[in-house]
């Protein structure tokens, strides 16, 4: 028999007491307190590795702190959720500040700009343009060098390469020894040509003294040896002038002297030993010619005063001829013809003088060195 309580419950359509209550709803795992705390920690770790991804996880963790689905009551009170949100932000910001420090403005400025010392050494100037190709004009005429450099776009300057600081005029008469390219203030390229006069040697360094060759001592040597010594000393052979020393010897050309270079001998020279040979110096070699068969094999005491062959001397006394006979003959010649007796073909002076030989009249004249000629 049912009790009154049970009967009452049955009467109202209710199940008899006691009854089994409905099971409580199950909370999703990601809404548990442990999952929320794990997400916050994961956001901090990822923030230390990849800043951008860590920021996304930080906001996802904050959302998980506040979201509760399925009609379930949130296990955290409001003030607890606020505290968790603030804690998440602080944790992630601290981790980001340590793992990804922000560069200071001064450091960035230092990295992007040169130091004060570098700035003082290299003032800001327009970046120079790429240098156009410039030929090497060393040894060329200054006029040619200037023309080529200006055509290549260079600003051209020139100066004396020697220590004499001479003004440079008539550029075709100057030769380039050094050329130096430089950057100009306007960003263009400039070139300076250091030059010497045509025929002058270049100094060893720009602005130093000209290294003029000095004259060696060639007196007493053969012509061949003298030429070799002059070449070794750096004396230009085109500055050498040849002259004869005897009154009855024609001056040879350089070709003639070279052909019989062992028979021609240097008797006198100018300049003397150690004399400088500049661009205006004429080197004179006074030559005498003799061989093993010659009667005279020495230089005279002075140039142009004697005859190498004594018989060529108009005043030469032949052996066996007395002075009185010569005088009477000379006087007779003078009386009859009014001129002295001469030796045809012998050297003579002064030009225009008149003499006789074997009944013929001869005049002291050229071409070349004066001789008694009919």
Image (spheres, rainbow, N blue to C red):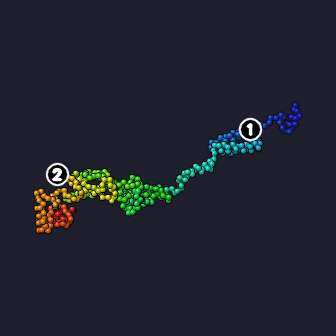
**Of residues 202 and 23, which is closer to you in this image?**
202
Comes first in the chain, label 1 or label 2: 1
Looking at the image, residue 268 sits to the left or right of residue 355; the answer is right
Label 2: which residue?
Answer: 293
For residue 303, which quarter of the picture? bottom left
Residue at (40%, 61%) from the top-left corner?
Answer: 168
Query: Can the viewer see residue 322 in this picture?
Result: yes
Quadrant (top left, top right, bottom left, bottom right) of the N terminus: top right
Mark 1 and 2 residues: CB-CB less than 8 Å, in contact? no
**Of residues 48 and 78, which is closer to you in this image?**
48
Label 1 secondary element? loop
Crowding at mark 2 (Cα within 10 Å: few <14, some 14-19, many 20+) = few
Residue at (83%, 36%) from the top-left corner?
Answer: 15
Label 2 secondary element? loop
Q: Which mark is residue 26?
A: 1
Residue 10 placed where, x, y %?
85, 36
Crowding at mark 1 (Cα within 10 Å: few <14, some 14-19, many 20+) = few
Quadrant (top left, top right, bottom left, bottom right) of the C terminus: bottom left
Residue at (13%, 58%) from the top-left corner?
Answer: 318
Residue at (34%, 57%) from the top-left corner?
Answer: 278
Query: Can the viewer see residue 260 in this picture?
Result: no
Q: CA distance from mark 1 to mark 2?
A: 146 Å
Residue 368 placed where, x, y %?
21, 62
Looking at the image, residue 280 sits to the left or right of residue 355; the answer is right
Residue 88 placed where, x, y %?
70, 43
């Amino acid at each position: 028999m049912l009790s009154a309580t049970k009967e009452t419950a049955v009467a109202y359509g209710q199940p008899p007491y006691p009854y089994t209550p409905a099971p409580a709803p199950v909370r999703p795992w990601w809404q548990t307190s442990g999952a929320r705390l794990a997400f916050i920690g994961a956001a901090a770790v990822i923030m230390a590795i990849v800043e951008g991804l860590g920021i996304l996880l930080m906001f996802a963790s904050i959302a998980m702190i506040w979201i509760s689905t399925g009609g379930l009551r949130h296990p955290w009170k409001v003030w607890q959720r606020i505290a968790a949100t603030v804690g998440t932000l602080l944790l992630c910001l601290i981790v980001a500040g340590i793992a990804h420090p922000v560069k200071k403005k001064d450091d960035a400025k230092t990295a992007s700009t040169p130091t004060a010392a570098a700035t003082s050494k290299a003032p800001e100037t327009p970046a120079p343009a790429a240098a156009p190709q410039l030929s090497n004009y060393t040894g060329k005429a200054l006029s040619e060098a200037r023309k080529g450099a200006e055509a290549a776009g260079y600003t051209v300057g020139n100066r004396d390469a020697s220590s004499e600081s001479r003004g440079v005029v008539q550029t075709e008469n100057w030769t380039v020894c050094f050329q130096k390219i430089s950057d100009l203030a306007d960003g263009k390229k400039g070139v300076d040509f250091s030059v010497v006069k045509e025929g002058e040697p270049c100094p060893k360094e720009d602005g130093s003294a000209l290294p003029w060759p000095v004259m060696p001592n060639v007196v007493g040597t053969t012509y061949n040896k003298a030429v070799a010594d002059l070449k070794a000393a750096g004396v230009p052979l085109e500055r050498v002038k040849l002259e004869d020393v005897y009154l009855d010897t024609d001056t040879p050309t350089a070709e003639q002297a070279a052909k019989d270079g062992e028979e021609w001998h240097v008797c006198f020279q100018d300049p003397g030993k150690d004399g400088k040979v500049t661009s205006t110096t004429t080197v004179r070699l006074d030559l005498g010619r003799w061989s093993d068969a010659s009667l005279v094999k020495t230089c005279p005491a002075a140039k142009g005063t004697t005859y190498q062959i004594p018989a060529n001397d108009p005043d030469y006394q032949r052996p066996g001829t007395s002075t009185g006979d010569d005088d009477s003959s000379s006087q007779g010649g003078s009386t009859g013809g009014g001129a002295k007796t001469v030796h045809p073909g012998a050297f003579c002076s002064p030009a225009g003088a008149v003499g006789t030989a074997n009944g013929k009249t001869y005049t002291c004249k050229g071409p070349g060195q004066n001789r008694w000629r009919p």
